C-alpha cells in the first residue's frame, strides 16, 4: 500500500463526517427535510472532496520539502568538489 491509499480513505471518512455534521447543523435550523438533505449532501460531498483536499495539502507540503532536499544535496556536492 502506498501513501495515497490511506490519505484517500482517511480523507473520505473525515470529509464525510465533517460534511454531514455541518450540513445537518445548518439544515436542521431550517427544518427537518433541510437537515436530512444537508446530512446526505454532506456525506456525499465530504466523501468526494475530503480526499482531494488532503492530497492537495500533502502536495503543498511535499513539494517545498523536496525542493529543500535537492538544494541541500547541491550544496553538499559543491563542498565535496
Image (spheres, grey):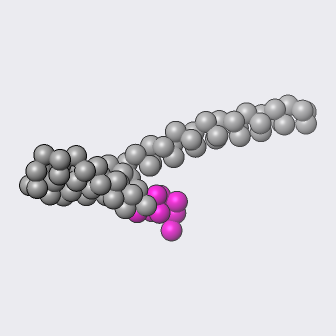
- Tell me: residue 30, above or below residue 47: above
Task: Please report the residue visible at 77 percent of the width from the left and 36 percent of the height from the top.
Answer: 72
Task: Please report the residue visible at 81 percent of the width from the left and 32 percent of the height from the top.
Answer: 75
Give the percent coordinates (x, y) of residue 2. Answer: 52, 63
Nearer to the camera, 37 or 59: 37
Give the percent coordinates (x, y) of residue 53. Answer: 40, 46
Nearer to the camera, 70 or 61: 61
Q: Is residue 37 magenta?
A: no
Q: Is residue 50 visible?
A: yes
Give the percent coordinates (x, y) of residue 33. Answer: 8, 55
Give the percent coordinates (x, y) of residue 37. Answer: 14, 54
Task: Please report the residue visible at 71 percent of the width from the left and 40 percent of the height from the top.
Answer: 69
> With 41 as the anchor, is 32 left or right in this view?
left
> With 33 as the anchor, is 56 left or right in this view?
right
- Tell me: residue 24, above or below residue 9: above
Region in magenta = 1-9
Amino acid at each position: 500500500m502506498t501513501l495515497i491509499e490511506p490519505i484517500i480513505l482517511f480523507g473520505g471518512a473525515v470529509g464525510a463526517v465533517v460534511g454531514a455534521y455541518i450540513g445537518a447543523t445548518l439544515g436542521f435550523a431550517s427544518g427537518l427535510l433541510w437537515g436530512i438533505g444537508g446530512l446526505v449532501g454532506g456525506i456525499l460531498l465530504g466523501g468526494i472532496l475530503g480526499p482531494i483536499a488532503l492530497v492537495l495539502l500533502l502536495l503543498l507540503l511535499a513539494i517545498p520539502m523536496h525542493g529543500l532536499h535537492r538544494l541541500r544535496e547541491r550544496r553538499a556536492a559543491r563542498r565535496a568538489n
